[in-house]
Image (tube, rainbow, N blue to C red):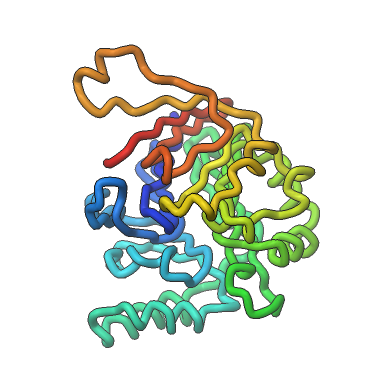
Amino acid sequence: MPIEIIVWDVQHGNAITFKTPEGNCIWCDAGAGSFDNGDEFSPYKHMKNPQIDLLVLSHPHDDHLADFWNMPMEKVTKCLHNHTISKTYQDTLAVTAEDPYIAATTLIKLFANDREFPCGLVASIAQPNERTLRMYAFWAKQDIGENLNNYSVVAFFCKGENVICIPGDIEETGWDHLRTAYAPAFEELLNKTTILVASHHGRQKGWYSELAELCNPDIVVISDSHEKETSITSSYDYISNGHEVKKRARNVREMLAPPIVAIKKCVSTRANGVIKISMRDNDFSVTVGKGI
């Protein structure tokens, strides 16, 4: 059975949902915002307020946290973040909270008292006879400068031969640090990555100069708004093999017509809308479409 992955169209933000066949829900970053038709949009509310088994927050910037306060504390089983910058999370999220008391209680529990995860293998969701999904995560645990992007949690989700890498907004200094600090595991997972989410919404600052030597994915996913000048898609085109992408049917007429399929090296929420990936042990499929 496949793992269903949704990369939400939250403009210049990031929100990615994983649903396993067993009903587990993993949420990577909490971006929210208006999608293509201009409506205000919360991915979490759209999913009917599910229980989140693991909430992974890459770093404390607003475009990755806008949906956070729509997620009640009791709906989040565990939260993974970089404990080195826990205080920054508390300060950033306190500003947007409606109720200061609830905010203080929630933030202390999540970002002060919560058990710190180890770098490396952080989760494994299994069926009786096989491991269906393994998650590895890495982040800087020491001072590597003032740029919060470089403290991003870089997460890898592995199912069979497929690996999806979600690196937050990490930049060159952060890439270099993780590659050295967690050798050889970090580099080996980059080598195996088949689906790469572009760091920093495809901006030049998120590009790693050594990436072409380390990563040869089948497709690159870019979560970004209509600010096309932030995209360096051509660089990601260069390292990507290309994969079949199907356009989602929006009405009965399109359902009855032959499906629109193309080989693409990159897909973006900016150009393609919501991106849905069905990831199996030996292959994966990609469907895209505007709106929800």
The structure residue drawn at horizontal position 56% and vertical position 27%, both measured from the top left corner, is 243
Q: Is residue 70 above or below residue 28?
A: below
Residue 57, image x and y in percent?
48, 64
Q: Nearer the viewer, residue 201 or 115?
A: 201
Q: Quadrant of the N terminus?
A: top left
Residue 92, image x and y in percent?
42, 79
The structure residue drawn at horizontal position 57% and vertical position 61%, both measured from the top left corner, is 169
Single out the residue that lies furthest toward the front.
229
Q: Quadrant of the C terminus?
A: top left
Residue 182, image x and y in percent?
75, 60
Q: Is residue 66 above or below residue 234?
A: below
Q: Nearer the viewer, residue 87 or 146?
A: 146
The structure residue drawn at horizontal position 55% and vertical position 35%, both measured from the top left corner, is 130
The structure residue drawn at horizontal position 54% and vertical position 24%, both measured from the top left corner, is 263
253 sits left or right of 216 in the view: left
**Rendering quarter of residue 73:** bottom left
Q: Is residue 120 visible?
A: yes
Residue 52, image x and y in percent?
36, 56
64 sits left or right of 282 in the view: left
Q: Is residue 135 visible?
A: no
